[in-house]
Every structure is written in C-alpha cells, then in structure tokens.
Amino acid sequence: MPDLMLLFDFTRTLLPPITLIVFIIGVMLRLVKWASFGFAKKDRPLGKSNRLIGAIKNWSIDMIPPWDLAGRVEPVAYVTGIVMHISCILILLGALHAASVQNIIGIPYTQSRLRLPAIPASNIPVSIPRNLLTYIITPVFLSSLGIMILRRVYYSLRGGPLKSLTRKGDWVAAPLLWSAGFTGFLVVVAVEPYVPLLTLHLILTQVFIMYLPYSKLIHSATVFLVRTWFGFRKSIYGV
C-alpha cells in the first residue's frame, strides 16, 4: 500500500505539470503543422453572403442526417456519434470533474454538497444532478463510444472505406478515452478497491490528455472554430 500511495500522490502532484507541458508542446507542434499548409487565396464572391447565417446553418440544419453526408451514409452510426459527443461534453463540464481538478491541484475549497471518499469538499456548485450524470449520462457515453469502437473494429476486419481511414493512433485514443471514462465511473460509484481505481483513472486521463494533440481527437478542441469557419466558407459558395 505505501508504494500505491506514492503512485497516487505522483498522479496528483508531479504528473499534472508533466501532462500540461506535453499537452502544450503538442498543441504548438500541431499549430506549426497547420500553419505550414498555408491559406487559400482570398475569394471575392459575386453576390452578397451572410456568413453568420452560414455558420448557424452549419451548426444546425447541416448536422441533421438528411443533409450531412456521414448521416446519409450511416444514420445510426451518425446519431450514435452525436450522442457520444454530447454526453462526453456533459461529463467534462460536470461540476464533479471541476471539483476533482480543484482538489487534486490543491486549490483551497469550502464546504458544499459535493462528496466523494477522496474528495471531501468543494466550493463549485453541482450544476448537473449527480445521479443523472453518474447513472444515465456516463453509461450512455460509455455505450455509445463502445459502439463506435466496435464499429471501427468490424469495418477494419470486413474492409471498406472506414478501414482505409483508420490509422494506428485510432486504436490508442478512443480505447484510452473509454478506459478513462469507465474507471471514472467505477470511482464515482465507489467500487472497491477505491484508491487503486482512482489512481488508474488519473493516470489514464492524463495520458489521454498528453496524447490528445498528437491524435485525430484534437478535433474535440478545434471543432467549434473549424465548423464555424466552414460555415462561413459554405455561405460564400452558396452551399
């Protein structure tokens, strides 16, 4: 147990700065790579175009399966992916994670309604009911992400367009995210042994964060900018 506690302390003290440094370096390298691609020449459309409407349309109507290409090809997989993304965002924005980070890095806290065995208190309010986040949203996330992983395995074995789009990194990022989510779920419901599970969850989560800028999942941090930009461009071309 002493060795385990040392590892647990490492995940809360020394590993977070390492994670942050590796993440920042990865983001910088990614930005340099994107900058090396250059930018398209400035277009001058013949007619007027409302870029704001184009961005809104790209974030709403264009995401519905009848209009989205991926949604037309595989509507069930597309809806499953949307559900996975929404549930993941809700989990990450939940007060539980904010409180966990706050306590792990040692920010002073006061009493509140949030309680966990290793996280006694936090001054961050519980914005999403804990039971809803734990027993509904998290299982939905794990199930939908698991389906997406199995779908990729199926098409990799069966062949098809998805196989050619799959890279080695895809077999790292998604399973790593699922494992971090699953161990986090076990921690929240206080499955024993608690400390080893919490330690494993912290390690998996921080390894995922470190790997994020180097994987295709970096789109999770750039999707708003990219989709908004494409909305602007589509409005220019009248798409």
Image (cartoon, helix red, strand yellow):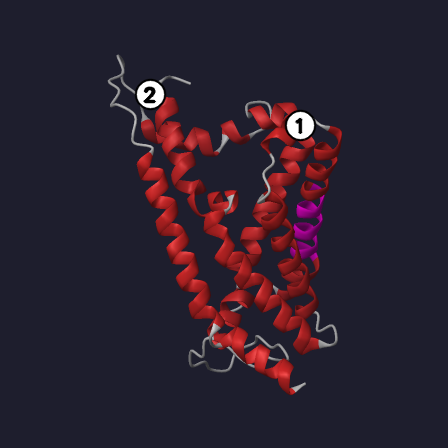
Residue type beneath disc 1: Glu
Furthest residue toward top:
46
Horizontal side of 113 relative to 218 (left or right) equals: right
Q: Is residue 146 above or below residue 134?
A: above
Report which quarter residue 117 is drawn in.
bottom right
Counting other residues with Cα less than 10 Å from the Cα at mark 2, is it few (<14), some (14-19), or many (20 or more)? some
Residue 103, how many percent across, how many down?
49, 77
Residue 166 is one of the magenta-drawn residues = no
Horizontal side of 52 relative to 155 (left or right) equals: left
Residue 142 is one of the magenta-drawn residues = yes
- The range drawn in magenta is 136-147
SS for callout 1 = loop
Q: Residue at x 67, y 70 (%)?
A: 187
- State which quarter of the image contains the N terminus: bottom right
Q: Which mark is residue 236?
A: 2
Horizontal side of 87 relative to 235 (left or right) equals: right
Residue 160, how many percent across, how many down?
68, 25
Residue 128 in view here: no
Residue 170 in view here: yes
Report which quarter residue 200 is drawn in.
bottom right
Q: Residue at x 42, y 69 (%)?
A: 17
Residue 205, how many percent across, how many down?
56, 62
Residue 197, how many percent across, how many down?
68, 71
Q: Which mark is residue 74?
A: 1
